[in-house]
Image: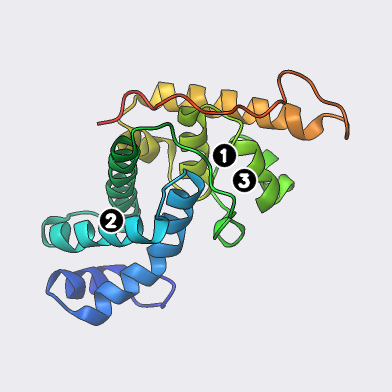
Amino acid sequence: MRTGLPFDDVLSAAQAGAAWAFEVLYRDLSPSVTGYLRLHGAAEPDDLASETFIGVLTGLAGFRGDEDALRAWVFTIAHRRLVDDWRRRSRRPQVADDAGDLAEHVGGDVEDDVLLRSGAQAVHELCGTLPTDQCSVLLLRILADLTVEQVAQVLGRSVASVKALQRRGLRTLRDRIEQPAGKTSRRSAPLRARPAMTGVR
């Protein structure tokens, strides 16, 4: 935990109803959750993040696991709220114009450092050109700092599928980043809309 307090102590206190402990969990996770929702086209990312943490608060007493498991669980709730938001608006998701908290939350053990080298604004712009499933995988890996296994859990996909989507997404971004300045091609043209997600539970 960023506070330096042992995670088990904070979790136990939060599960017992201590407001200060839930606040610690909220401060630790909410910037990444809000950034993920914003970059994935939530109409009101702050409101959706609040809904996410209401769900966390409601289900926290029954949670069992370590800090990594908690992070994966919170992002699973956030992703489900996001999918519900997409369905409510009955249109394909669009990446928002604000790069939000991405610059402060880059990390994750990915196969390539292409996103780290490109900068937050470039990541924002480039991810907006990817299909939704590839974008989801990369944002959860980079922004949420989840493992491949955790991303598979969040998206309701197999580990092999997540790895394949990650490879394709990173390959596409690397090609676009390394493309000479001013040179455009069909591959680098932004997509007007990304297809709706499949395989989401």
Badge 3 density bin: few <14, some 14–19, many ≥20, Cα 10 Å: many
Instruction: Report the side of 180 relative to 94 (left or right).
Output: right
Q: Is residue 113 visible?
A: no
Helix, strand or loop status at disc 2: helix
In 3D space, how far apart are the residues under numbered discs 1 and 2 (Cα atoms)? 26 Å
Of residues 183 and 5, the one nearer the viewer is 183
Helix, strand or loop status at disc 1: loop
Is 31 drawn above or below residue 111 in the view shown? below
**Which is in the foreground here, disc 1 or disc 2?**
2
Badge 2 density bin: few <14, some 14–19, many ≥20, Cα 10 Å: many
Q: Which residue is mark 2?
A: 52
The C terminus sits in image quarter: top left
Instruction: Report the side of 23 relative to 57 (left or right).
Output: right
- Residues at marks 1 and 3 touching, judged by CB atoms closer than 8 Å: no
Q: Earlier in the sequence, mark 1 or mark 3?
A: 1
Residue at 62% across / 58% down in the picture?
A: 103
In 3D space, how far apart are the residues under numbered discs 3 and 2 (Cα atoms)? 23 Å
Residue 82 is situated, as x and y percent measured from the top left of the image, at 34, 44
Q: Earlier in the sequence, mark 3 or mark 2?
A: 2
Q: Tell me the number on the disc at residue 124.
A: 3
In 3D space, how far apart are the residues under numbered discs 1 and 3 (Cα atoms)? 17 Å
Q: Of the residues shown, which amino acid type is indicated by label 1?
A: Val
**Which is in the foreground here, disc 1 or disc 3?**
3
Q: Which residue is mark 1?
A: 110
Q: Of the residues shown, which amino acid type is indicated by label 3?
A: His
Q: Quadrant of residue 153?
A: top left
Q: Is residue 47 visible?
A: yes
Residue at 23% across / 68% down in the picture?
A: 11
